[in-house]
């Protein structure tokens, strides 16, 4: 861009008047630099300053001034070369502001943020990393990141990184993982680690996000011990109470009046509900701690479902519901834990009974669906509300969780059933049948891999 284009003035209007189109301060500075060139013959290295263009906008210029000499070497003027750097300067300022914001975020993050190169050498760390591991930034930069890991993660880190660079096999990158770190004083601690990969200036960089979960693990341990202790302390007296009530209703202390019998039966029923609640809480605790045990053996699914359907009819009678086995395809053998599969099935049966209208029936079927044994339980209840369908298998989830709900329960049964079925290599799901004008209801089903014939 020429001066004429920049100022939008004709050459005659510019000659002798350049300083006049600057503000007073800038004009004086330009005049001073021009005198320096004329009087001392010096070259003014590039410098930037602001000018006002013909439209009144402030522009940033990068200018160099050199003396203009005649054939005899005498200085007769100044050659001034200017480059409009307004846009570039604005971009640089924006980049500096963005970098400052990013740095502020990184420096104030509660998680440790570490960058390493392909060799595992640490490029940068944030203050949280120093706090978590006890090292200063200077002690970490240039060191191998494996110094922050406890065994066996430390010795396997470089091998894993080399294997990834060679084969592209991901184990940590792109995934969250719980590992153990080691502080400067040698103490080991649990941490969550997430690693991502980026390419900057054709260089591969790995970014590790580290979170110290020591406190969380301790809280989980305390919660687990508390739940286990309270549950066991509750189950023992409840079992005793239930047994005593059973003896009374069985006539162990003689005949009781009908009014007393009704009260005792109500107490016994509520005791059974409390025991079931305690068992569910213990199962959830075992699931979360990974200690839920399974004893696998070959199982005939038709026999299991038939026997449990008959055994659960007494429960269905409380709701005036009939359990009906409508389809039973023989020879469907699976490998499973009998007691756990019964637990999953009973959860589906009890839910179907609770949500079906009085006088109705619940249909149960055992069929072969694409090489898998499917057990389905169909009720004629109101169906699953749309807003509830996405999280129906979550813990403590109920379609009606209000204090005035008509159907009791903890909201743990389906979550436990899902875990049990998945531990068997199967899947669990449901189908809603609440189409307008048609029969309402829901079919819950689970599928298990069949054993070879």
Image (cartoon, helix red, strand yellow):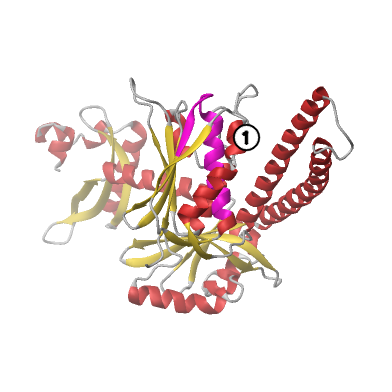
Q: Residue furthest right?
A: 253
Q: Nearer the viewer, residue 98 or 322?
A: 322
Task: Look at the picture and state if 325 lies above or below 69.
Answer: above
Q: Is residue 121 left or right of residue 249?
A: left
Q: Main secondary structure of the magenta part?
A: helix
Residue extending farthest front: 255
- Does the stretch in magenta take in 341? yes
Please state the horizontal and vertical placement of residue 186, each as a whole percent of the image: 70, 73
Is any part of residue 106 visible from this angle? no
Please tell me which residue lies in front, 33 or 219: 219
The residue that mark 1 highlights is 409
Q: Horizontally, is 401 left or right of 12 in the view?
A: right
Q: Residue at x 43, y 61 (%)?
A: 333
Residue found at x 11% / y 61%: 71
Q: Secondary structure at mark 1?
A: loop
User: x%, y% of residue 181?
Assistant: 61, 67
Q: Quadrant of the N terminus?
A: top left
* Screen quadrant of the C terminus: bottom left
Magenta region, residue range:
340-363
């Amino acid at each position: 861009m020429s001066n004429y284009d920049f100022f939008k003035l004709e050459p005659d209007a510019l000659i002798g008047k350049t300083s006049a189109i600057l503000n007073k301060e800038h004009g004086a500075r330009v005049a001073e630099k021009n005198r320096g060139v004329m009087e001392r013959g010096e070259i003014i290295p590039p410098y930037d300053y602001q000018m006002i263009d013909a439209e009144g906008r402030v522009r940033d210029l990068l200018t160099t001034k050199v003396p203009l000499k005649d054939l005899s070497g005498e200085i007769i003027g100044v050659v001034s070369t200017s480059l409009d750097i307004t846009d570039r300067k604005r971009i640089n300022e924006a980049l500096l502001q963005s970098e400052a914001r990013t740095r502020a975020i990184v420096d104030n993050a509660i998680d440790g943020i570490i960058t390493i190169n392909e060799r595992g050498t640490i490029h940068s760390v944030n203050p949280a990393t120093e706090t978590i591991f006890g090292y200063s930034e200077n002690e970490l930069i240039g060191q191998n990141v494996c110094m922050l890991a406890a065994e066996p993660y430390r010795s396997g880190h470089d091998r894993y990184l080399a294997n990834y660079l060679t084969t592209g096999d991901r184990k940590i990158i792109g995934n969250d993982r719980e590992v153990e770190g080691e502080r400067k004083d040698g103490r080991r601690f649990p941490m969550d680690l997430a690693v991502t990969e980026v390419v900057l200036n054709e260089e591969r960089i790995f970014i590790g996000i580290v979170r110290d979960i020591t406190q969380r693990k301790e809280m989980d341990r305390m919660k687990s011990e508390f739940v286990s202790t309270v549950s066991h302390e509750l189950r023992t007296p409840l079992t005793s109470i239930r047994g005593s009530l059973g003896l009374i209703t069985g006539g162990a202390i003689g005949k009781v009046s009908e009014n007393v019998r009704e009260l005792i039966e109500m107490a016994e029923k509520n005791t059974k509900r409390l025991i079931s609640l305690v068992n569910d809480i213990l199962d959830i605790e075992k699931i979360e701690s990974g200690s839920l045990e399974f004893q696998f053996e070959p199982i005939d699914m038709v026999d299991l479902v038939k026997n449990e359907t008959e055994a659960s009819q007494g429960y269905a009678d409380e709701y005036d519901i009939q359990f009906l086995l409508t389809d039973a395809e023989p020879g469907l053998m699976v490998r499973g834990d009998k007691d756990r599969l019964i637990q999953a099935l009973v959860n589906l049966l009890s839910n179907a009974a609770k949500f079906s209208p009085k006088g109705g029936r619940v249909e149960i079927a055992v069929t072969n669906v694409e090489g898998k044994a499917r057990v389905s339980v169909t009720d004629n209840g109101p169906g699953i509300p749309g807003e509830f369908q996405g999280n129906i298998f979550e813990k403590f989830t109920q379609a009606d969780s209000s204090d005035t709900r008509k159907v009791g329960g903890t909201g743990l049964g389906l979550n436990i059933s899902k875990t049990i079925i998945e531990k068997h290599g199967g899947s669990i799901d449901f189908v809603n049948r609440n189409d307008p004008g048609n029969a309402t209801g829901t079919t819950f089903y689970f599928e298990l891999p069949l054993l070879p014939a």
